[in-house]
Image: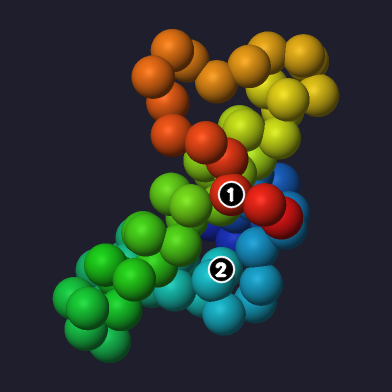
Amino acid sequence: MTAKQQLLERAPNWTEAQGRRALDAAEGISESWGELEDQSQQLFLHASRALDAEEQAAGLGPWPGAPKRPAA
């Protein structure tokens, strides 16, 4: 299985640009460190929101002392 096929299997919701950047990063090619920083922040936010939605769907509330969820 090629790296591109593995990426499509593991991250099916990524855009083509996100996938290209991930493959480039894996090969050590990067346009700039700032772009990687922005990309990692976007991926962190995406994962955090997905986890939050999953927890809400399971009926789990936020941990004690957590900030209130922003209105969607």
Quadrant of residue 21 within the rendered picture: bottom left
Q: Earlier in the sequence, mark 2 or mark 1?
A: 2
- The residue identified by callout 1 is 70
Q: Which mark is residue 6?
A: none
Quadrant of residue 5 within the rendered picture: bottom right
Q: Residue at x 43, y 34 (%)?
A: 67
Residue type indicated by callout 2? Gly
Q: CA distance from mark 2 to mark 1?
A: 29 Å
Seen from the viewer's position, the closer of residues 7 and 34 is 34
Is residue 2 in view?
no
Circles 2 and 1, Cβ within 8 Å, touching? The answer is: no
Count of labels in the image: 2
Q: In this image, 32 relative to 12: left or right?
A: left
In terms of secondary structure, where does tag 1 sit? loop
Horizontal and vertical percent position of residue 55? 68, 22
Q: Residue at x 62, y 33 (%)?
A: 52
Horizontal and vertical percent position of residue 38? 34, 71
Q: Quadrant of the C terminus?
A: bottom right
In the displayed image of the protein, which residue is found farthest to the left? 33
Q: Residue at x 43, y 12 (%)?
A: 64
Q: In this image, 29 relative to 14: left or right?
A: left
Seen from the viewer's position, the closer of residues 70 and 5 is 70
Which label lies toward us, 2 or 1?
1
Question: How is the model colour-coded?
Answer: rainbow
Structural crowding at the residue carrying mark 2, measured as other residues with C-alpha within 10 Å and reported as few (<14), some (14–19) or many (≥20):
some
- The residue identified by callout 2 is 19
